[in-house]
Image (cartoon, helix red, strand yellow):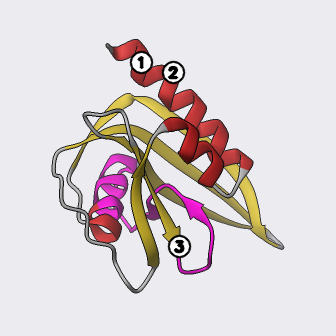
Amino acid sequence: MEKEKSCGAVIYNQNNEVLIVKHNAGHWDFPKGHMEANETEEQTAIREVKEETNIDVELYTDHKYITHYYPKENVYKTVVFFLAKNKSNVTIKQDKEIANIGWFNFDDALNILTYDIAKDVLKKSYKDLNNLK
């Protein structure tokens, strides 16, 4: 069985809105991407967020959410998301991979996210975000 690993971030702004992206494949999710050789999970998350959204983030490395699923037959994928806050306000989507991008309040994001696994990550991250205050 082949194993894949991706990292990304659940990013909140000062209004507690969360950034989600619509991938060209049609699903709404958090920005993420594959780890490259010799990268840490944190480096991958920061790089992928910047590549897909043009946003610089600060990660809360003590708040991470690990998911596992099978994207296709004989492929076991692990995705690590970090809770993050944005450090820049201008989003520019990467046209090659991203069809749309936006900041959403919790309820709207919960309705827009495509997969239940992403909705679970949203719920956990929102709880953690509110506990930071």
Which quarter of the figure has residue 38?
A: bottom left
Residue beneath disc 1: 130
Q: CA distance from mark 2 to mark 3?
A: 26 Å
Tag 2: amino acid: Lys
- Find residue 23 and name its label: 3
Element type at mark 3: strand
Q: Classify the position of the C terminus by image quarter.
A: top left
Q: Is residue 14 left or right of residue 111?
A: left
Sequence-wise, the earlier of marks 3 and 1 is: 3
Quarter holding the N terminus?
bottom right
Residue 36 placed where, x, y %?
Answer: 39, 68
Q: Residue furthest bottom?
A: 96
Contact, CB < 8 Å: mark 3 with mark 1?
A: no
Do the numbered discs 1 and 2 sit on residues whose CB atoms are within 8 Å?
yes
Residues at circles 2 and 3 in contact by the CB criterion of under 8 Å = no
Residue 26 visible, this orientation: yes
Q: Which residues are magenta?
A: 23-49
Residue holding disc 2: 127
Q: Position of residue 78 (x, y in %)?
A: 62, 53
Type of the residue with mark 3: His
Residue at x 37%, y 53% (from the top left corner): 45
How far is mark 1 from mark 2, CA to CA? 5 Å
